[in-house]
Amino acid sequence: MTETTGVTGVTGATGATGATGTPHTGVLRSEYCVIACAEAWRGAGEILASPMGLIPSLGARLARLTFAPDLLLTDGEALLVRPDGTPEGWLPYRQHLALVSGGRRHVMMGASQLDRYGNQNISCIGDWSRPRRQLLGVRGAPLNTLNNPTSYWVPKHSRRVFVAKVDMVCGVGYDRVAAHPGTERYHRIPRIVTDLGVLDFETPDRSMRLAALHPGVSTDQIREATGFELAVPEEVPYTREPSAAELRLIREVLDPAGARTKEVAG
């Protein structure tokens, strides 16, 4: 995955970032997150977008209104919908499953834990036989990750989420797919978007890499908030700047009430 950027951040010896240009003033961190989520569906064509969470949903709808007009949006039940939520088609469950099993869906899920190879946990914290905390459960995470591209949205980048080893594997990472040949046909984790930046797995061993920083964030912040050694290139770009038209859509059409700022401050 290559993050399209307007400015380039440069990693120095201390891990701080400089830039060849100045990020646009007045753009909120939450809006950079929307842009980074939207980019997950760039060039996707006619596939089903399944964003989970407010900011991923804003990203998918923004992509549909701008650079991904063929993207299919769903109400999560039985309808295909336009970006404003009005129906535009019928998607019976059997047809939905056909899209899922054939790789023609791109999910953006949440994650309670993620490790350096992209294994995801949303089930429990602690020993699974006697967990300290019960979470959502495995749900559809295994089939999502093996049957179609799956990205992740993490609204608070921290060592509690980015751990050396997940307590239970729900979403399948690159190391486990490599250990089971034949499972990799549709497995792909295009990106992880957090409130600090964008991560991917474009490394020789498919371990997690810092792909982009949101303006105002340093590589030191990312490293400090990650519970394992993260691959950090010498040059790390910023998340691209939203256009004036995209900002208008986010602020006036998609989220005029500003709910995005309750998920990511600033």
Image (tube, grey):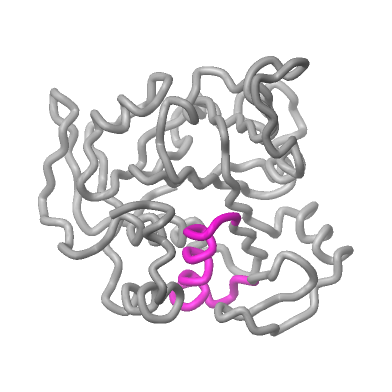
Residue drawn at the location 39% of the way across and 49% of the way down: 2
Q: Quadrant of residue 218?
A: top left
Residue drawn at the location 66% of the way across and 78% of the way down: 81
Q: Is residue 54 above or below residue 163?
A: below
Residue 59 locus on image (x, y percent): 47, 63
Residue 44 locus on image (x, y percent): 56, 63
**Residue 212 at least partly seen:** yes
Q: Is residue 251 above or below residue 167?
A: below
Q: Magenta segment: does it hold 123?
A: no
Position of residue 97 in the picture relative to residue 75 (left or right): right
Viewer-proximal residue among 99 and 252: 252
Residue drawn at the location 72% of the way across and 40% of the way down: 146
User: Which residues make up the magenta segment?
Assistant: 52-72
Residue 110 locus on image (x, y percent): 57, 44
Residue drawn at the location 43% of the way across and 80% of the way down: 253
Residue 233 locus on image (x, y percent): 29, 32
Position of residue 20 in the picture relative to residue 237 (left or right): left
